[in-house]
Image (tube, rainbow, N blue to C red):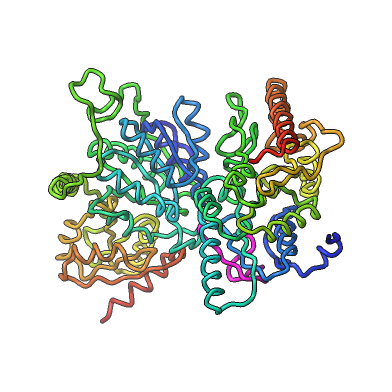
């Protein structure tokens, strides 16, 4: 770890990605995350790495796809409407089994929406988004420090599983400034070209082929099963979450990203009044931390899920709780950020007698 | 031929109170072009400065039918409107003639919207596409685009000790559009309002797709005094940086030839985005720019003289 710096989230993401060994950035302008590509545009050439502004998001993600096929650590960053345009590329990347990192600074939707922070792309990110049976690993930091830390993990996970990793943030986490300490630089000189990469046949007996299709259904089913096996391993090994004040909690709030940090204040307010609430904060949204939620269902009286959407993670929480306890919800839409007091007021409505 | 007085005395379709930056000439471009239409207009507007600043929710500055679209689809939606309109006319459900206009910035025209534009021009829909060209993604904070000139400093091609800013020449969008064999394509500016007005007239009269690229000096990101928009617009023409010309049925006609071409420095001077070019080590960039501009002008003169089809 180095010195402590005061940085904007959107720039900390770029700096962390660079230190984590991102060799190529491809992107296209969109608010509210332009600071990220702008930061890359200054830093990448200094290090002899690639910064390229594409002519559209469709081009940007396919440039990432191309770079990823050579085993290069590649990244793009965008915001909701831009991410929608990239979905076809995501789907191809999934079935071709190549690694890359995508940051989505979510904004209010649907359609053009607005540029205020939102969490309404949860379904799109965690359930696939593009066509076909696929998943990406989805991670959701809630502080600038965590944004910086998880960028390193994002690249590691992408390479380990040859999968796309989505870092799901929002404009609020991008614009806020917080102290941040970066992990040590990844030594990119030690990078070896992966065996599967398409970089010319070289000394291999056969050339590498990366492919996202099989025209015969039997073959395509096998390809799908390879993906599903990979997802099973990821669900087994890569679940991450934070439990906050859950040990003595009578109630559990579930929340991720921006809302999770607000919920921590809600919990302080509630505990001052003697109401023991804890927080279960999924850090990986896919794979989803269903076991911890299932286990806590025997300790708490009910769950209270809160998000900046109309109840998207709520569905995963309900599946995990599986009817053992009630799951209540409070959400704000279209880019409105709830306050800690508002969440507490909504929570209290369910306390009953 | 209309007089300036007649043009400005027409009721403007874009109401005052919009949120365009002070010194922005987009409203002049939009109002002049629509003033040239003697039929009702329908506007398809891509995401960009014009759209954002004219429709701050829940308000709108538009007094004419207007539709906002995704960044990449102004030409596609205009094509859809035109197709529906033709179908309605055929069935007798509509009687009035209309002019369909698509407005896009240079990002939405040269870059992300280019596929839709090319498709609509090739299919031959009768509509006018207008790019207000401020030479970059100005609404999102000055990122480079396919229209950004050689040597300009932007946030994604920043100038510095290792870089002169953008190292590519901008696309020649007027000739690219003309190469679709459309009946009318032209290059214009806001300062020469009569020229812009006349070009819009010709565009509306064309039997098929038409295209106008209007230079839109951006006080915010070209970084100059807000009072100087028209001055820079004029300098762009006087230096041959942005010649006023049109391509009618493939034949080039230059609308204005400066008596004495001014050196490009006069256009670059005072613009923050070119400030770095005046350092001694970057003089060669200005020289290269001058050479390119002179060569392009010579080529344009030859095209006009020979009347070779573009």
Q: Is residue B219 visible?
A: no
Q: Residues in magenta?
A: B53-70
**Which image quadrant is residue B65 in?**
bottom right
Q: Nearer the viewer, residue B52 or A181?
A: B52
Relative to residue A20, is residue A191 depicted above or below? above
Q: Nearer the viewer, residue A246 or A151?
A: A151
Side (left or right) of B57 relative to B264: left
Q: Nearer the viewer, residue B83 or B21?
A: B83
Residue A203 inside the magenta-drawn segment? no
Q: Nearer the viewer, residue A254 or A130?
A: A130
The chief SS type of the magenta part is loop
Q: Residue furthest bottom?
A: A353
**Which image quadrant is residue A72 in?**
top left
In percent of the image, x 44 and y 65: which residue is there?
Answer: A339
Residue B61 inside the magenta-drawn segment? yes
User: Split into 4 quadrants, where in the image is the N terminus of chain B?
Assistant: bottom right
The spot of residue B6 in percent (x, y) is 84, 65
User: Split into 4 quadrants, where in the image is the C terminus of chain B?
Assistant: top right
Side (left or right) of B3 relative to A47: right
Relative to residue A48, is residue B41 depicted above or below? below
């Amino acid at each position: 770890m180095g010195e402590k710096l005061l940085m904007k989230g959107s720039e900390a993401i770029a700096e962390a990605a660079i230190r984590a060994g991102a060799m190529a950035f491809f992107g296209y302008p969109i608010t509210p995350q332009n600071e990220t590509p702008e930061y890359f545009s200054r830093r990448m050439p200094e290090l002899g790495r690639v910064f390229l502004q594409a002519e559209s998001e469709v081009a940007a993600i396919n440039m990432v796809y191309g770079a990823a096929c050579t085993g290069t650590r590649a990244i793009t960053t965008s915001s909701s409407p831009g991410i929608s345009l990239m979905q076809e590329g995501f789907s191809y990347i999934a079935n071709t089994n190549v690694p890359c990192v995508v940051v989505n600074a979510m904004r209010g939707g649907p359609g053009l929406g607005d540029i205020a922070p939102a969490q309404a792309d949860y379904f799109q990110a965690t359930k696939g988004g593009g066509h076909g049976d696929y998943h990406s690993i989805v991670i959701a930091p809630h502080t600038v420090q965590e944004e910086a830390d998880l960028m390193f993990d994002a690249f590691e996970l992408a390479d380990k599983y040859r999968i796309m990793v989505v870092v799901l943030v929002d404009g609020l986490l991008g614009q806020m400034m917080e102290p941040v300490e970066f992990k040590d630089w990844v030594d990119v000189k030690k990078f070896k070209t992966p065996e599967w990469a398409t970089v010319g046949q070289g000394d291999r007996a056969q050339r590498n082929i990366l492919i996202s299709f099989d025209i015969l259904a039997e073959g395509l089913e096998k390809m799908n099963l390879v993906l599903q096996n990979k997802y099973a391993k990821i669900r087994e090994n890569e679940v991450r979450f934070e439990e906050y004040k859950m040990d003595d909690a009578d109630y559990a709030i579930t929340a991720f990203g921006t809302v999770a940090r607000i919920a921590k204040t809600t919990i302080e307010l509630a505990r001052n009044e003697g109401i023991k609430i804890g927080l279960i904060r999924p850090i990986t949204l896919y794979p989803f931390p269903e076991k911890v939620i299932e286990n806590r269902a025997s300790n708490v009286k009910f769950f209270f899920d809160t998000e900046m959407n109309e109840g998207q993670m709520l569905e995963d929480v309900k599946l995990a709780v599986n009817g053992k306890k009630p799951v209540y919800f409070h959400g704000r839409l279209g880019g409105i950020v709830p306050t800690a007091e508002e969440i507490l007021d909504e929570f209290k409505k369910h306390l009953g007698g | 031929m209309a007089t300036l007085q007649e043009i400005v005395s027409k009721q403007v379709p874009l109401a005052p109170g919009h949120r365009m930056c002070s010194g922005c000439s987009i409203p002049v471009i939009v109002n002049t072009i629509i003033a040239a239409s003697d039929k009702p207009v329908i506007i398809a507007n891509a995401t960009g400065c014009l759209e954002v600043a004219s429709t701050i929710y829940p308000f709108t500055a538009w007094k004419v039918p207007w539709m906002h679209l995704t960044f990449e689809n102004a030409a596609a939606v205009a094509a859809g409107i035109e197709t529906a309109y033709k179908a309605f006319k055929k069935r007798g459900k509509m009687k009035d003639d209309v002019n369909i206009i698509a407005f896009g910035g240079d990002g939405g025209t040269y870059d992300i919207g280019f596929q839709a534009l090319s498709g609509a021009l090739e299919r031959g829909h009768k509509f006018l596409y207008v790019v207000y060209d401020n030479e970059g993604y100005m609404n999102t904070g000055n990122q480079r685009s396919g229209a950004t000139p050689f040597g300009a400093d932007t946030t994604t091609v920043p100038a510095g000790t290792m870089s002169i800013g953008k190292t590519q020449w901008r696309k020649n969008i007027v000739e690219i559009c003309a190469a679709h064999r459309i009946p009318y394509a032209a290059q214009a500016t806001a300062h020469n309002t009569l020229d812009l007005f006349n070009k819009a007239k010709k565009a509306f009269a064309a039997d098929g797709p038409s295209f106008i690229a209007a230079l839109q000096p951006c006080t915010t990101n070209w970084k100059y005094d807000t009072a100087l928009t028209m001055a820079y617009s004029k300098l762009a023409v006087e230096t041959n940086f942005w010649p006023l010309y049109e391509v009618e049925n493939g034949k080039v006609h230059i609308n204005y030839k400066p008596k004495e071409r001014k050196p490009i420095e006069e256009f670059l001077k005072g613009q923050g985005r070119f400030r770095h070019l005046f350092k001694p080590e970057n003089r060669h960039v200005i020289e290269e720019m001058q050479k390119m501009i002179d060569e392009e002008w010579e080529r344009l003169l030859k095209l006009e003289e020979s009347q070779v089809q573009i």
